[in-house]
């Protein structure tokens, strides 16, 4: 058979096809494993469903080198922690894994765009800040002034989203009507406590860079650089969301 050139060509083609099929299968398996791992970690951190995608570079090579790039994570938009109606798109690069649970690895760059709808802000304030939310019936945005108006039957509270010390803040600008019942000295600490609740213990040193009021809500940019992954355990310095990294 092997004296026939056609037979030789067929054998070579079959061998090459099997080799390619094996590489493709290994690539798909590696991506599936990585997808499950990244999905689990991010779902745990944001407390919402997520969709994960990887860049065009062969993932198997990244997996062998434990060095990953072009990872995009998009949340379902139901919530980010206690914040309802919040959606995040996260781009992660230069991820290096060590295989050591005490020092899982590092992330060279993480950039996130957070979109929080006006309706989501209303529902979150109603649920998380009873003192203020009990009066709020609607939330509108004013992009020109960069403010949000928390509206109620008896008046309104105008707040301005800002970045203060790398953290998101809602600063009270004015009160009308409600001011007789809820003075600024009462409203501002309630908003501060709420923002602290939804932003504290964010892993990897992720911090706010900018915030913008839009027609639909609020858009914020978050990032971190050269971050060390916490150990995958509960307690000081650890985060169970990062458990089980390969």
Image (tube, grey):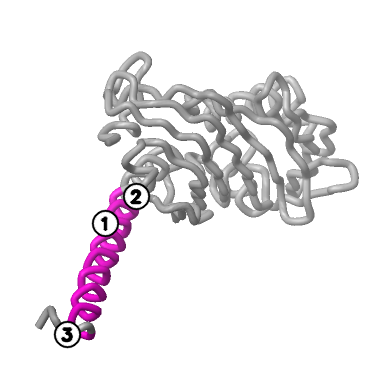
Q: Residues within 10 Å of mark 1 (few under 14, many from 20)?
A: some
Q: CA distance from mark 1 to mark 3?
A: 33 Å
Magenta-colored span: 6-33
| Residue occupying image coordinates x 37% and y 16% | 237
Foreground tag (3 vs 2): 3
> Which residue is at a point 27% across and 23% down the rendered structure image?
100
Q: Residues within 10 Å of mark 2 (few under 14, many from 20)?
A: some
Q: Residues within 10 Å of mark 3 (few under 14, many from 20)?
A: few
Q: On the picture, is 175 further left or further right than 41?
A: right
Q: Position of residue 98 (x, y in %)?
A: 32, 26
Tell me the quadrant of the picture where the C terminus can be found: top left
Q: Which residue is mark 3?
A: 4
Contact (Cβ within 8 Å) of mark 2 with mark 1: yes
Q: Earlier in the sequence, mark 1 or mark 3?
A: 3
> Which is the main secondary structure of the residues drawn in magenta?
helix
Q: Quadrant of residue 209?
A: top right
Q: Which residue is mark 2?
A: 60
Residue 214 lies in the magenta stretch: no
Left or right of 124 on screen, residue 217: right
Q: Along the horizontal axis of the image, is 80 left or right of 132?
A: left
Which tag, 3 or 2, sits closer to the chain's start?
3
Q: Secondary structure at mark 2?
A: helix
Residues at marks 2 and 1, CA–CA distance in whole angstroms: 7 Å
Q: Which residue is mark 1?
A: 26
């Amino acid at each position: 058979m092997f004296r026939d050139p056609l037979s030789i060509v067929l054998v070579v083609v079959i061998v090459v096809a099997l080799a390619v099929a094996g590489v493709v299968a290994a690539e798909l398996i590696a991506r599936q494993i990585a997808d499950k791992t990244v999905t689990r970690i991010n779902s745990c951190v944001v407390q919402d469903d997520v969709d994960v995608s990887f860049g065009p570079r062969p993932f198997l090579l990244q997996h062998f080198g434990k060095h990953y790039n072009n990872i995009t994570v998009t949340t379902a938009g139901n919530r980010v922690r206690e914040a309802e109606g919040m959606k995040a798109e996260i781009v992660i690069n230069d991820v290096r894994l060590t295989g050591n649970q005490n020092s899982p690895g590092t992330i060279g760059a993480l950039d996130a765009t957070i979109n929080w709808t006006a309706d989501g802000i209303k529902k979150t304030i109603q649920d998380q800040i009873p003192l203020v939310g009990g009066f709020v019936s609607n939330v509108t945005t004013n992009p020109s002034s960069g403010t949000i108006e928390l509206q109620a039957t008896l008046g309104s509270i105008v707040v301005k989203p800002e970045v203060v010390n790398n953290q998101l803040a809602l600063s009270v600008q004015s009160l009308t009507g409600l001011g007789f019942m809820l003075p600024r000295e009462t409203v501002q600490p309630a908003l501060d406590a709420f923002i602290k609740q939804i932003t504290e213990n964010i892993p990897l040193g992720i911090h706010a860079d900018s915030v913008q009021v839009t027609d639909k809500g609020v858009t914020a940019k978050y990032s971190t650089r050269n971050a060390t992954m916490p150990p995958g355990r509960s307690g000081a310095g650890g985060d169970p969301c990062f458990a089980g990294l390969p």
